[in-house]
Amino acid sequence: MRAAVRRFDKNRPGRKTSNEEWKNPHDPQAKVGRTKDGACDMIYKPEHVSDLESGAIAQAEVLEGDHADTKALSERVASAVEVVNRIVANQENGVVRSLTADKGYFAVEEIAQIQEFDIRTVIGDANAARRRKEALAAPLRKTLHRAACAVKSQSGKALLRKRGMHLERSFEHVLDEGGLRRATLQGTENLTKRHKIAAACF
């Protein structure tokens, strides 16, 4: 199985958010951020981990609006792998072989941990041009090399194309057609439960 991960809402690059100043007293986990149409609102971040061979959503979660993509990425990947392995326990090809995501998910330390799970990472390094590789330890330099080779390979490029196809489709169905673009619940726990139901229907 080849997995992919994506999260929905992005703050514009370089823009300072005011989450330290703005708080919703009724929904403290909602954070200031940009919606899909560019408006500023209190948001959450739905995230899907999908199978790039079937398009099925293996794991769905709603994170706080200011949750960094790279924060605890390896833990979320390990959780998704555990779910997949339970589902396909009796199949030979039930092992997650690769993880594909956009550049926002790239953090050397997290990528290194994921590669230790024997999972190929197809995630571009947004800071590749200005990264000082000589300042990194040898294992991390090896991590960067393996990640760069995966992205540049023909198979890696094919996976990145599949990521756009399957993940965009799942968000279209769940958020737009499924009516979850706007939340009617509060808190990540309640929203995640609701989002999992929609993902299961998808």
Image (tube, grey):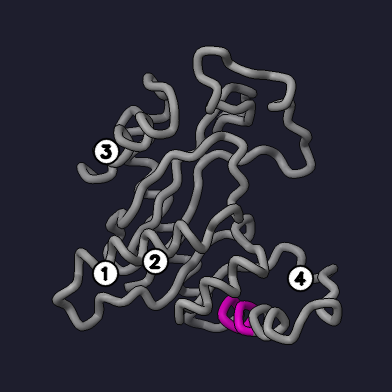
Q: Nearer the viewer, mark 3 or mark 1?
A: 1
Give the quarter of the image for residue 12.
Answer: top right
Residue lying farthest top?
25
- The kind of residue on which mark 1 rests is Asn
Dot 3 or dot 1: first in sequence order is 1
- Distance between the Cα atoms at labels 4 and 1? 33 Å
Name the residue carrying label 3.
Answer: 198
Residue 137 inside the magenta-drawn segment? no
Give the quarter of the image for residue 66.
Answer: top right
- Distance between the Cα atoms at labels 4 and 3? 37 Å
| Helix, strand or loop: magenta stretch | helix
- Residue 126: x, y in percent? 71, 63
- Residue 103: x, y in percent? 63, 60
Q: Residue at x 46, y 74 (%)?
A: 158
Pick the quarter of the image with the N terminus: bottom left
Q: Residue at x 62, y 47 (%)?
A: 68
Dot 2 or dot 1: first in sequence order is 2
Name the residue carrying label 1.
Answer: 85
**Label 1: which secondary element:** helix
